[in-house]
Amino acid sequence: MRRDIFQAIADPTRRAIIALIALNAMTPNAIAENFNTTRQAVSKHLRILTECELVTQEQQGREIYYTLQVEKMKEIDKWLSQYRKLWETRFNQLDKVLSTMKKQKK
Amino acid sequence: MKNNLLFDFTVDKAAKTVYITREFDADLSLVWDAFTKPEILDRWVAPKPYVAKTKFMDFKVGGRRFYAMVSPEGNESWLIQKYTSISPKTNFKLFNAFADKDANPQLPGSDWDYSFSEQNGRTKVNITIYNESLSRMEKMIEMGFTEGMSVTLKSLDDLLSTLSQK
């Protein structure tokens, strides 16, 4: 199942995990230490983030490290910028329509 | 020359809500008409080179608007809106969804809230869009709007790459 990237960031714990590993790749245990939830709960969040391709796992020796995929995060911002751009374009067109209507009324 | 009309666009990803505020240099009744009359809506809602075509629009509570965004190649993306509340020249609300060509909505949709207020001859419009699923908005972009905006997006891409090189 392809997960919705926005689902990944809709949860506050997942957003906190993203902020944590943005600086350094971390093991699940190290991540879990930052939260008052169970290790299982953190694992579940990490699984969702992985399925959304927002994080990747890397084996280093006996440990698994989670790394944030910065490019994927940028995709979200890029998409939002597109949506903003769409509204800007639309409103600029409306400005022209309104000014035409104003002239016609006079 | 660029105008100095207010434009504010914020997204609360957690609340799956988009907030848009825009000021227009026209009085309230004109702006209200521009948002509620099909012949005017069709002149501005589709970003060029797309065109909007309203098949029917019944602006009353419970009434619907069925329209298409038509690409330069002639591809039609249909949308259906149902008006859920109307306070003339103040506010209206609608439920918006993609549709097939027979006006059957494809859920999930989104709830839209438009508020209008006039001050010193300018009209401010506040739009709140609540999405059951933010991926739905993602789809809206995928459905072809990107093409029409590729030129502006190109410069955005350049900007993003400049920023990431820092």
Image (cartoon, coloured by chain):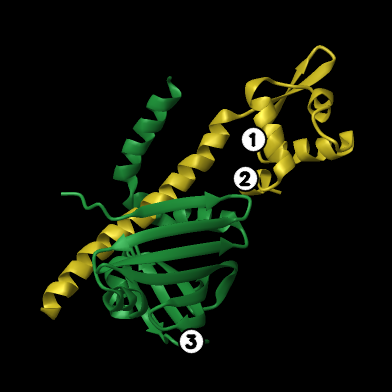
Chain colours: A yellow, B green
- Identified by mark 1, the residue type is Leu
Q: For residue B109, what is the image quadrant?
A: bottom right
Identify the subunit bearing mark 1: A
Q: Are marks 3 and 2 on the same chain?
A: no
Numbered badge on residue A5: 2
Circles 2 and 1: CB distance less than 8 Å?
Answer: yes
Q: Is residue B23 above or below residue B84?
A: above
Does residue B143 appear anywhere in the picture? yes
Please, what is the three-letter code of the amino acid marked with disc 2?
Ile
List x then y, in percent, for residue A96. Answer: 20, 64
Give the percent coordinates (x, y) of residue B128.
50, 63
Disc 3: which chain?
B
Q: Secondary structure at mark 2?
A: helix
Disc 3 target residue: B63
Which residue occupies the foreground of this view, B61 or B52?
B61
The image shows residue B136, relative to residue A28, as above or below, that is below
**Height in image: B24 above or below B155?**
below
Residue A37 image point, x, y percent: 86, 38
| Element at label 3 | loop
Looking at the rendered image, the disc whose residue lies closer to the viewer, 3 or 1, is 3
The image's mark for residue A54 is: 1
> Residue at left 62%, top 45%?
A5
Q: Quadrant of residue A20?
A: top right
Q: Nearer the viewer, residue B124 or B127?
A: B124
Compared across the picture, whether A42 is left or right of B148 comes to: right
